[in-house]
Structures are given as C-alpha cells and as structure tokens.
Amino acid sequence: MKIALVGYGKMGKMIEQIALDRGHEIVSIIDINNQQDFDSPEFASADVAIEFTTPHTAYDNYLKAFAKNVKVVSGSTGWMKEHGDEVRQMCNEGGQTLFWASNFSIGVAIFSAVNRYLAKIMNQFPQYDVEMEETHHVHKLDHPSGTAITLAEEIVENIDRKQAWAEDTTDPTLLRVDHIRRGEVPGIHTIRYDSDADLITITHDAHSRKGFALGAVLAAEYTKDHNGLLTISDMFKF
C-alpha cells in the first residue's frame, strides 16, 4: 500500500517505521514546511494519507487530500465541533473517505467497549456517581482529550441521570471530566463510579505512542478497501 504522511512529529515518525515494517511504501511526507507537496504527483499516488497534526490545521488537510481523491486516516482532534457537518457531508454524499478516531489504540478500543458495558450496568444503580479524569503530556493543545470526549459521550448515552458532560462542574446531572497536563505522559484515562459503600475504577494507561501508531496503520489498511466516514467501531466489531 502507498501511504502519505501528513504531520511528521513523534507520531508521524513512529507511524512511518511501523508502516515500513509491515511492508508498505511511504510515497510522501508533508509537514509544516512543505505544504506545496499536497499538489505533488507523489501525494496524489497515495492510497491513504495518515494525518496527525493539530486542531487548527486538520480540516484544511482533509480538504487538500480530498481534492486529490486521497483517502484520509486522521487522529487529529478538536476540529469536529466547527467542521463536523461539512466532513460528514463530504464523506456521506461527496464520495470522500475519512477514517477518524480520537484514539487508534487497540487497548483503548477494548477499554471503550468495557466503558459502554459498565455504563449500561451502572444505569441501574443511581447510588453511584460517575466522573472521569484524563492525563496527557504538556504539549497537548486541546482539552479534554478527544478520547475522553468519546468515552464521556458513551457514558452519557447509557446513563439516564447524566444529561451531558462538562469540565469543572458540580452539577449532578452532568458528567464531570477533568484534565491534567504533565511531563511526557502518552495518555491516561480513568473513569470512577463512587458511592458511600465503595469505589469502582477502570483505567487505560498507555505506556507509549506505539499502540496508537500501530492502530493508525491498521486503520489505513482497512480504509484502503472501504469508503465513507469510518471509525474504530467499523474496524473492530465488539
């Protein structure tokens, strides 16, 4: 498979190595200093572009890739609120393909399934209040993390006593989501169900970015043969 990389930071370099190890070809690498390469024949030859950049540049990168009819796998977060409707229309009606996930880790996909199942159970036990905390490295620009938002939305969808999620809230009808930024932490997500009697906690603690990078390459392999707006639940059926 021919892969273009959009964003060549730590994640981009790790994705490059895993893709090469899995027998794929990197045909184009685009970073902040060579944006003109979106118009190159090398980029246009890619089966899939893997995009990990910033909340402020991701949407424009999608447009540039779509203009060349290149499918995109993206882990960039923070753009959905402003541009989600346009992206959905381009994929559902305009024939473009985007595989987007707030987190590509296989472990996080499993954790998300556990989160949904536990929330369904805890809906029956109102004595437990639920809250979430996410911790990431100091370089992360957005908060809460895209993964935390996805997990929070899953909880709200399954627990009737929570109407929405919010940061820094004391409203019992809202799921409180806290964020911490420290050091070089790849990502920790903790969900707590607390009652007068006991505390139930589930946590996903990433040891490195390797799990995210491998998941992104697996997503690219899946995207090559699928179309539309895709996500982790399409690739992993659990």
Image (spheres, grey):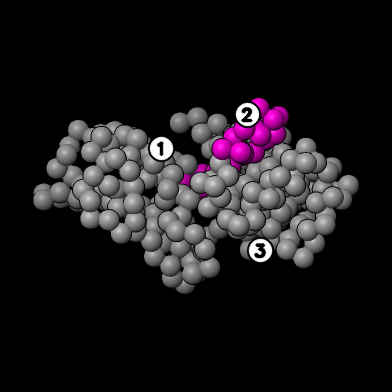
Q: CA distance from mark 1 to mark 2?
A: 25 Å
Of tags 1 and 3, the one toward the viewer is 3
Q: Which residues are magenta?
A: 85-108
Q: Residues within 10 Å of mark 2 (few under 14, many from 20)?
A: some
Where residue 51 appears, as percent x and y from the top left, is: 66, 51
Give the CA separation, mark 3 to mark 2.
31 Å
Along the viewing direction, whichever of 25 and 99 lies nearer the viewer? 99
Residue identifier under label 2: 92
Label 3 Cα neighbours within 10 Å, binned few <14 / some 14-19 / many ≥20: few
Picture residue at 42% right of the left edge, 50% below the top: 148
Q: Which residue is mark 3?
A: 9
Pointer 1 or 2: first along the chain? 2
What amino acid type should be assigned to the residue bearing mark 3?
A: Gly
Residue located at (58% from left, 52% from top): 76
SS at mark 3? loop
Magenta stretch containing residue 152, yes or no?
Answer: no
Pick out the residue farthest to the right.
41
Q: Is 92 inside the magenta-drawn segment? A: yes
In terms of depth relative to the viewer, which is nearer, 178 or 172?
Answer: 172
Asked if marks 3 and 2 touch (Cβ < 8 Å), the reply is no
At horizontal 50% and vertical 30% (from top left) the residue drawn is 237
Q: Is residue 78 left or right of residue 86?
A: left
- At which x and y percent is residue 55? 58, 55
Q: Are marks 1 and 3 in contact (CB under 8 Å)?
A: no
Residue 45, horizontal then vertical, whole percent:
84, 42
In the image, 89: left or right of 81?
right
Question: Residue 113 got which mark?
Answer: 1
